[in-house]
Image: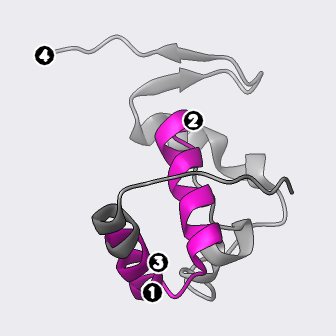
Amino acid sequence: MKNITVSIADDLALKLRVEAAKADKSLSRFLSETLERAMFGASTESVAARIGAGAGEFEVPDDIDASNAEIARLFGVASDGSGDAKVAAKHP
């Protein structure tokens, strides 16, 4: 990680410190994550933190492809089992 020095207005510095405290983060981490999201639209939360919110809420199948035909049917897409999906013709 690279350390840099920046100069910002006093009132902005205060607002940033308040927001960092609300997020329970250091000012350095808060600024780094905020800049990354602003520049790249990237989520900077760790995968564990994002998945942690749903821990125990989902059941992951042993074979993720086992339900492809059912999923294709639910979305109105034809599946020939090859992994290639084709939009099914809709009949009125």
**Mark 4 or 3 closer to N-term?**
3
The stretch of residues the image draws in magenta is 15-42
Residue at the left extreme of this rendering:
92
**Mark 2 or 4 closer to N-term?**
2
Query: Which amino acid is tagged 4?
Result: Pro
**Mark 2 or 3 closer to N-term?**
3
Residue 58 placement (x, y as % from top left): 59, 77
Q: Is residue 54 above or below residue 91?
A: below
Mark seen at residue 83:
none
Residue identifier under label 4: 92
Query: Which amino acid is tagged 1?
Result: Ala
Could you say which quadrant of the image residue 14 lies in?
bottom left
Whether residue 20 appears in magenta in the rendering, the answer is yes
Q: Residues within 10 Å of mark 3 (few under 14, many from 20)?
A: some
**Mark 4 or 1 closer to N-term?**
1
Residue 34 placement (x, y as % from top left): 50, 55
Indicate the secondary structure of the residue bearing disc 1: helix
Q: Are marks 3 and 1 in contact (CB under 8 Å)?
A: yes
Residue identifier under label 2: 40
Mark seen at residue 21:
1
Foreground: 54 or 87? 54
Q: Label 2, label 3: how many angstroms apart (C-alpha)?
A: 20 Å
> Measuring 33% from the left and 62% from the top, which residue is drawn there?
12
**Mark 2 or 1 closer to N-term?**
1
- The majority secondary structure of the magenta stretch comes to helix
Indicate the secondary structure of the residue bearing disc 4: loop
Query: Which amino acid is tagged 3?
Result: Ala
Indicate the secondary structure of the residue bearing disc 2: helix
Q: Label 2, label 1: how many angstroms apart (C-alpha)?
A: 23 Å
Q: Residues within 10 Å of mark 4 (few under 14, many from 20)?
A: few
